Amino acid sequence: MDNLSKRQNNEAQVLIVEDDPHNRDMMLRMLHFMGHSADAARNGEEALDLLELKNYVLVITDLRMPRMGGIKLAQNIRQHSKKEIREVRIIGLSACVMWEEKVEFWQAGINDLLEKPVRMQALSSFIDKNLECLSKKLNLIET
């Protein structure tokens, strides 16, 4: 069973990867308020462990974190041996992104970028957009 088919009533399994406890808790509360199931990791290493345990549809990751940041996490996800992990949608988080950096993010396998501070409306729109992209991809594969 694929990640998207596990959703019910637009609920998504989301993994937040954020080293700042305030930002992490705030995003968890927003996602729960929106009706999504969400877990959190403090860095990319923890996120990889959680990805092994649960099927997530989206990973929302800070791009700059100690130990393993979002770029290295995205690279590890895209090279993972399990297809359902390789195909998860990745949204990068950053307060400031230079144009040159965007190329590096896309090459690492990050699907979308969300600017900090995260607002609920923006988070909701990004999740909807990425779920729609995933749904279209799955429909193309099935036909």
Image (tube, grey):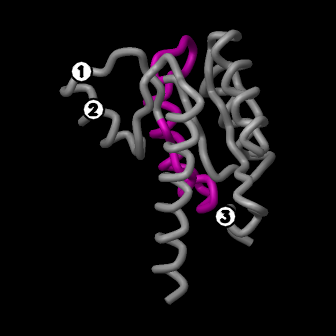
Kind of residue at disc 2: Lys
Crowding at dot 1, Cα within 10 Å, few <14 / some 14-19 / many 20+, comes out as: few
**SS of the residue at dot 1?**
loop
Q: Which mark is residue 102?
A: 2
**SS of the residue at dot 2?**
helix
Give the residue number, with chain letter if any, for mark 1.
98
The one of 24 and 41 positioned closer to us in this rendering: 24
The one of 104 and 116 positioned closer to us in this rendering: 116
Question: If you read the primary sequence from the N terminus, does the residue marked by circle 1 or circle 3 appear first?
Answer: 3
Q: Residue at x 48, y 71 (%)?
A: 136
> Vertical placement of 143 versus 55: above or below?
below
Q: Quadrant of the N terminus?
A: bottom right
Q: Residue at x 53, y 23 (%)?
A: 118
Q: Residue at x 59, y 56 (%)?
A: 81
> Vertical placement of 120 versus 94: above or below?
below
Give the residue number, with chain letter if any, for mark 3.
4
